[in-house]
Structures are given as C-alpha cells and as structure tokens.
Amino acid sequence: MISQTFTVLNPSGFHARPTKVFVQKVGTFPCKVNVIKGDKKVNGKSSLSMLTLGIQQNDEVTLEVDGEQEEQAIKELGALLTHIFEE
C-alpha cells in the first residue's frame, strides 16, 4: 500500500461533477482506493462517500492505494485531485 497527500485546487471544491469524474477514473484501476480528509476515510469508488467528505479548495486529501497498478493509480488520481476543474 502507498499513500500520498494532495491539495485540492478547484475553486468549487469537490461537488457532484468533479466527484463523478474522479470516481469514474478510480473505477479504471483494479486496486483499492481510499480517500482521507481529516479523520474521515471513504472508498474512492463511491460518489456518495466522496461527497460526504465535503472537500473544498485548499483542503489536503490523502490517497491510500493498495493493489495492482497502485503507483500509476496514485499518480493519475493525485493529478485529478489537484487539477480537476469544470470544463
């Protein structure tokens, strides 16, 4: 298992649309992904769970990735966490 902390830059934080994009990307990896904010830890493959974190701009979020392709997953998902913006 590997973990890394990222800072969310999206001015709107994580609401429905960015969360959907993130969860869809998580689903492309065969590994387990947990997202941690403060003392809350949720499954990164669940949109509803992700929304309960209430992620806002400049929040620090930790990704825990365990399993196949974990290094690729943490790199790509971390990039999404820091750079996901509405198009």
Image: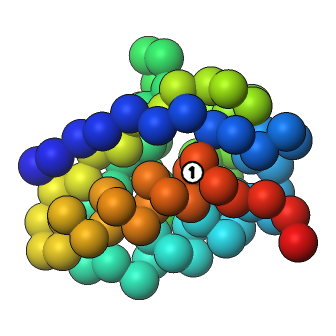
Quick check: 12 left or right of 48?
right
Foreground residue among 61 and 20: 61
- Within 10 angstroms of label 1, few (less than 14), some, or many (20 or more) residues? many
Residue at horizontal 53%, vertical 26%?
Answer: 60
21 over 49 or under it: above or below: below
Q: Position of residue 73 (x, y in %)?
A: 31, 67
Foreground residue among 75 and 16: 75
Residue at horizontal 18%, vertical 74%?
Answer: 69
Q: Position of residue 43 (x, y in %)?
A: 43, 51
| Callout 1: SS | helix
Colour scheme of the rendered structure: rainbow
Identity of the amino acid at label 1?
A: Leu
Visible residue check, residue 40: yes
Quick check: 66 left or right of 79?
left
In this view, the residue farthest toward the bottom is: 28
In this view, the residue farthest toward the top is: 39
Res 31 → quadrant: bottom left
Res 52 → quadrant: top right
Residue at horizontal 26%, vertical 71%?
Answer: 72
74 over 5 or under it: above or below: below
Residue at horizontal 11%, vertical 49%?
Answer: 1
Visible residue check, residue 54: no
Residue labelled with disc 1: 81
Q: Position of residue 22 (x, y in %)?
A: 59, 64
Q: What is the quadrant of the C terminus in the image?
A: bottom right
Q: Position of residue 21 (x, y in %)?
A: 67, 71
